[in-house]
Image (cartoon, grey):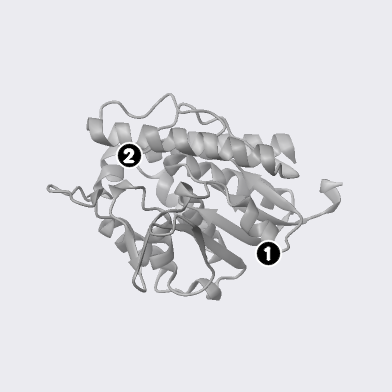
Amino acid sequence: MFFNRKKVALALGSGSAKGLAHIGVINALSEKKYQIDAIAGTSIGAVIGAYYAFGKLEDYKNYVLSLDKRKVFSLFDINLFPSKGLMDGDKICKFLMSTLGEQNIEDADIKLMIVATDLNTGEPVVFEKGSLIDAIRASISIPGIFTPATINGSIYVDGAVSMPLPNEVLREKGYKRIVSINLNKHLSNNINGDLPNIVTTLYKSFSIMNYYQTKYSLECHPPKILIEPNLKNIGMFDYHKAKIIIEEGYRAAIKVI
């Protein structure tokens, strides 16, 4: 049945560097002539979804394939005296602005939905219009690691706090042929132990929370099409392993489709 239905909506989950597997999945879908007409993305899923929706995924792919450890860490701005987060996220925003530009979400080539978490209400918030960069900045703000984002007076943190895999967003919008990419099938074994201990602890805790939240969500609302790359040895900052991660996403997708 799935092979006769070439139009799909993607739910792209959270997972930091693991999210590069989304690129491999999208490559596999494109190769098999599937038409992606909507994307809901949380955290890194929002980043990858945005690059695809604005026709710049290949440029982003080429960029991450060029990264080494030094280049990866040059993108993160450490707060020497952190009060709201260990990193500001300003460098990442400048990078996004330089590669995506000053775009509005509603101007994407396909329907794009970006999930963040309202820190006051605890509810997931879906951005469908307005500043693309602001929405992504909110969606990737891992608590304690990145400073929260403020949009129109509201404070937001990472979308994965409330919705690590945004299947429900697409379902509520009426999409039936949903392809979900779960980056959190396994608890990560590699959390980069050479990083400062506070980062290791925060991210490991966040990953555990994502794992159990996603597991529960999938048990309650199993999607028709689920792709789960094996990324248990990939840590938060392992963007320099882009080739391996993208290839694993591709392999996992081909097995399913």
The residue under the point 45% across, 26% down is 233
Q: Residue at x 44, y 68 (%)?
A: 132
Let me know if residue 183 appears in the view.
no
Dot 1, crowdedness within 10 Å: few (<14), some or many (≥20)? few
- Front residue of this view, candidates 122 and 193: 122
x, y percentage for residue 255? 71, 34
Q: Position of residue 177 (x, y in %)?
A: 76, 54
Mark 1 is on which residue type?
Answer: Lys
Q: Visible in this render: residue 43?
A: yes
Task: In the rendered view, tell whether residue 187 sits above or below residue 257.
Answer: above
Q: Secondary structure at mark 2?
A: loop
- In this view, the residue in front, 25 or 38, is 38
71 left or right of 19 in image = left
Secondary element at image label 1: loop
- Relative vertical location of residue 193 with respect to residue 15 in this rendering, above or below: above
125 lies above or below 61: below
Residue 152 position in % (x across, y down): 36, 74
- The residue tagged 2 is 68
In this rendering, the answer to whether 110 lies above or below 245 is below
Kind of residue at badge 2 = Asp
Report x, y in % for residue 257. 75, 41
Q: Residues within 10 Å of mark 2 (few under 14, many from 20)?
A: some
On screen, residue 190 versus residue 168, left or right, reads left
Q: Which residue is mark 1?
A: 173
